[in-house]
Amino acid sequence: MKIQQLLDHHGIVANPFSDEDAQTDLVFKGYCITHTYHPAWDKIYGNPAEPATAVVFGEKGSGKTALRLQIVRHLADYNADHPDARSLVVEYADFNPFLDRFRERFHGRRRKIERVLGHVKLWDHMDAILSLAVTQLVDRILEVRQASHPAACDAAPPAIVSLDHAQVRDLLLLAACYDRSTAGSSDDRWDRLRQKLRHSTWRTKWDLALPALVVVAAVGLMGGLAHWDWLRTPWPYVVLAASLLPRLWRCLKACYQARGIARHTRVLNQSRRRLRRILMQFSDRQLSGQPLPRAQRTDDRYGLLGKLQSVLETLGLTGIIVLVDRVDEPYLINGSVELMRALVWPLLDNKLLRHPGVGLKVLLPSELTDFVDRETSDFHQRARLDKQNLVRSLQWTGESLLDLADARLTACAADGRTPRLRDLLDETISDTRLLDAMRSLRVPRHLFKFLYQAMVAHTNAHTDAQPVWRISSDVFESTLALYQRDQTAFERGMGTV
């Protein structure tokens, strides 16, 4: 007997339990993402009109990635309905490139990942978030189709004509420091952005014109007075050298600033030559008093974040939602709870988590809750998790898992059919026993794996000629016992499920 025969008999056109990862789960993306929610959804999602932070702890398979994808989808729908009050969605979920660049800053024994992560600070996370946000914004403005973030192509290009001169300067400075797209040359992208914003740089060329004017004036003076013998004296050359000093001084300042930015944005791969060239296209007056990430401190980053928010608000993006996920997946972390703690803890700072107009949705493995409970009062005063819409456990009850299974069956049902999980099970399996089994599975991933294995065991036990359309109590119980054994071994780090 084949699984598809069993499904067809109950009016199910596709297996709703064959996928285990929300990233590739078509049933989830096609139906459940807008129809099925965790009980804590409202607290985590909040109101996009007033972005708020949520810190969520959940075990593997409890649906953290599904939550992230649901938030992205619902924010896209919200943005479509509110074109003048949209949110910029930043998915801070791939830590590998940032960790690789950060590690390159260290040498010798300091390159051990335990020591490297001990140096991660809040401003490093802010640099990474600013880089993701600025790169996405530049992609939107330049209408890049191979955008670094899919959301960069979800709407019409921003109305950049509404930006004033100061905001144009701020956006160009942000792009100089944080634009990290692989869609094209970084130098070319900045020049295209400058042209798109109609930012003129001719006033910054005065120190290049000065030596030329000095030469023309000197030649005209010597020719008019017929004193070409002055060329044999040092004075014409001294005056020419003096005319070159303003350019040289600006070059030295730009080199110093570029060196500071490249040195202190440790999670980014900066080109000092590129930074120097760009900084030379701003006048001293334009750069005076502007925050640049030239030191290991958060003040400059908050200043740049404020400038980014000002630009975004003018462009109709009134909020920033940062989704932090998959902190256990970087290859340097490799699932180590201690390394996850070292990576994430600097991010848990109340000043950033409660920053106006910014909402962080921090989705963390449940293993970190033990570290939270053991932390000192200094950590709790800095993080203020009591104010961050804290969800200590992304729990699923037996009833909610049963509803989830029924929702997936509905998503895969043929027209006019409404299958339920109860229809696939023998009547000897009581409702109480079914709910107890659901509770023991705890999370959606375990539920899907168990139900898939139960269907396989059932169909393997019967032939095509003599099909049985309901999973028997014996198959249900034996499959559950085997799965729970594997589940226990997996949680002890001694096997897989």
Image: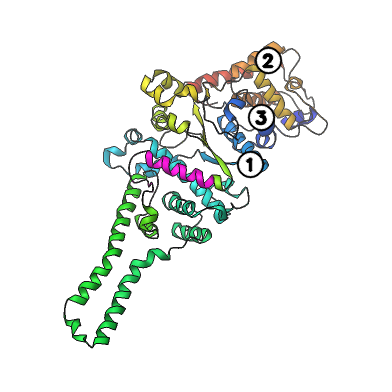
**Amino acid type, residue under disc 1 in the picture:** Asn
Q: Vertical placement of 340 versus 154: above or below?
A: above
Report the magenta stretch's main SS: helix
Name the amino acid type tagged 2: Leu
From the image, which quarter does the C terminus lie in?
A: top right
In space, the residues marked 3 and 1 are separated at their CA atoms by 32 Å
Element on which disc 1 rests: helix
The foreground one among 411 and 184 is 184
Q: Is residue 304 magenta?
A: yes
Outermost residue, right side: 416
Is 290 on the left-hand or right-hand side of 242? right
According to the picture, the residue beneath numbered tag 3 turns out to be 17
Give residue 248's quadrant in the image.
Answer: bottom left
Report the magenta residues as a range.
Answer: 290-312
**Quadrant occupied by the N terminus:** top right
As measured in the structure, the alpha-carbon distance from the residue carrying label 1 to the one carrying label 2 is 41 Å
- Residue 398 is at least partly visible in this image: yes
Name the residue beneath numbered marker 1: 79
Q: Secondary structure at mark 3?
A: loop
Three-letter amino acid code at the position of disc 3: Phe
Labels 1, 2: front one: 1
Position in image of residue 327 (x %, y %): 47, 33
User: 10 Å neighbourhood of mark 1: few (<14), some, or many (≥20)?
Assistant: many
Say which label, 3 or 2, has the lower sequence index. Answer: 3
Q: Are discs 1 and 2 less than 8 Å apart at CB?
A: no
| Residue 380, numbered circle | none
Quarter of the image holding residue 276?
A: bottom left
Q: 261 or 411: which is nearer to us?
A: 261
Q: What residue is shown with label 2?
A: 434
